[in-house]
Image (cartoon, grey):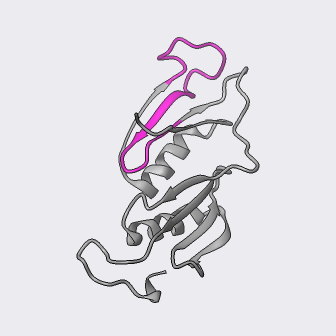
Amino acid sequence: MTAPSLYLHLPGTAAEALDFYRGVFGGEIEHHTFAQFERTDGPSAAIAHGVLRGAVELYVSDAGEHDEPFAARGLMVALLGRAEPTTLRTWFVSLSEGGDVIDELQRRPWGASDGRVRDRYGVQWLIGYEHGTDSAGQAMTTADA
């Protein structure tokens, strides 16, 4: 069974969001317009369905006239241990560009590091990792928070 994927209906910013998330996570983008899907419930050039495939997979579309644009309260997307600590720290910084750091990525009393950021599209991300050794087998220090 695969993990659930995030699917966002955005208010006319789907193409921009796909480019932003590809810049953060890398990967490949595929998208189709309302015209390509023969949909008439939105502008013909709007994104009816888009996907980013890579280290993080997510879907986006421009909200059609019957779709409610994305808004969330009390929801986080957890990327705990989904990549090497260096990559996770880079994702945290990149997601914060144009967004808000809610809780700095930092070492916690229980020994792991985590932090929360709300990106420019309103998605709240929880990013973190356990300490131990890196991919080269080197011990990580508190500077690796």
Where on the picture, by quarter, is residue 51?
A: top left
Q: Nearer the viewer, residue 121 or 109?
A: 109
141 in relation to 52, above or below: below
Reply yes or no: does residue 51 show up in magenta: yes
Q: Is residue 76 left or right of residue 88?
A: right
Q: Residue furthest left?
A: 136
Residue nearer the viewer, 39 or 60: 60
Q: Residue furthest front?
A: 110
At which x and y percent is residue 47? 54, 29
* Relative vertical location of residue 71 with respect to residue 74 in this rendering, above or below: above
Where residue 98 sits, quadrant-wise, is: bottom right
Q: Position of residue 34 (x, y in %)?
A: 55, 20
* Residue farthest to the right, as pictured: 73
Region rendered in magenta: 33-59
What residue appears at the point 41 percent right and 88 percent down from the top-left corner? 141
Q: Residue 105: x percent and y percent?
A: 57, 74
Does residue 78 sit above or below 33 in this rendering? below
- Main SS category, magenta section: loop
In magenta stretch: residue 35 = yes
Give the quarter of the figure containing the N terminus. Answer: top left
